[in-house]
Image (tube, rainbow, N blue to C red):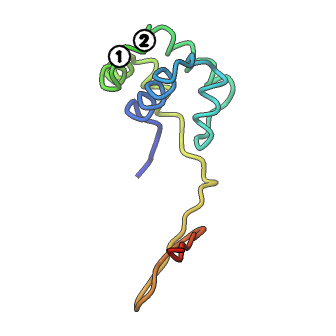
Amino acid sequence: MEEFLTSAILSGIAYDVMKCGVVLSITELKQRLRGWIISDSELLVLADEMKKLKLTDEMSETAIERKIAASPELIQLLENIKPSSESNTIIQHHSGSGDNIGRDKIIHNGK
């Protein structure tokens, strides 16, 4: 299955940025899209198209998603943005007693 950046993911990013009072800028988008393969030129177009939507911090995440989904330019752009293959995937098989912690483990002895 081919995966790409969806309007739901982008709306979540936009909502999170704006609810913190931060402007949805190229720099902010680049930071939030680190796990995605996106060129600087695509990032510039994405930021410009997002500005055209006139999003506000008073909008819900659903309202933002609807505006994104109604933009053919954004949808076409989103379909070209793929996840980076540099993800850390941990696959473990576990049987018996104990735990199955894949990364850092913090143990509190109750003291």
Q: Residues within 10 Å of mark 1 (few under 14, many from 20)?
A: few
At 57% from the left and 69% from the top, the residue drawn is: 106
User: Vertically, is 63 above or below 51?
Assistant: below
Q: Amino acid at mark 1?
A: Met
Mark number for residue 37? none
The reply to whether discs 2 and 1 touch (Cβ–Cβ < 8 Å) is yes
User: Vertically, is 66 above or below 88?
Assistant: above
At 51% from the left and 10% from the top, the residue drawn is: 51
At 56% from the left and 12% from the top, the residue drawn is: 48
Farthest front residue in view: 111
Give left or right: position of 89 versus 98: right
Q: Amino acid at mark 2?
A: Thr
Please state which of residues 47 and 58 is positioned toward the viewer in this rendering. 58
How far across and how far down the image is residue 68, in percent?
39, 20
For the C terminus, the image quarter is bottom right
Please state which of residues 77 and 54 is positioned toward the viewer in this rendering. 54
How far apart marks 2 and 1 lie (CA) works out to 6 Å
How far across and how far down the image is residue 17, in percent?
51, 25
Q: Secondary structure at mark 2?
A: loop
- Residue topped by disc 1: 59
Q: Secondary structure at mark 1?
A: loop
Give left or right: position of 56 versus 102: left
Give left or right: position of 64 versus 81: left
At 46% from the left and 80% from the top, the residue drawn is: 99
Mark number for residue 56? 2
How far across and how far down the image is residue 54, in percent?
44, 7
How far across and how far down the image is residue 86, in percent?
64, 54
Give left or right: position of 14 versus 44: left
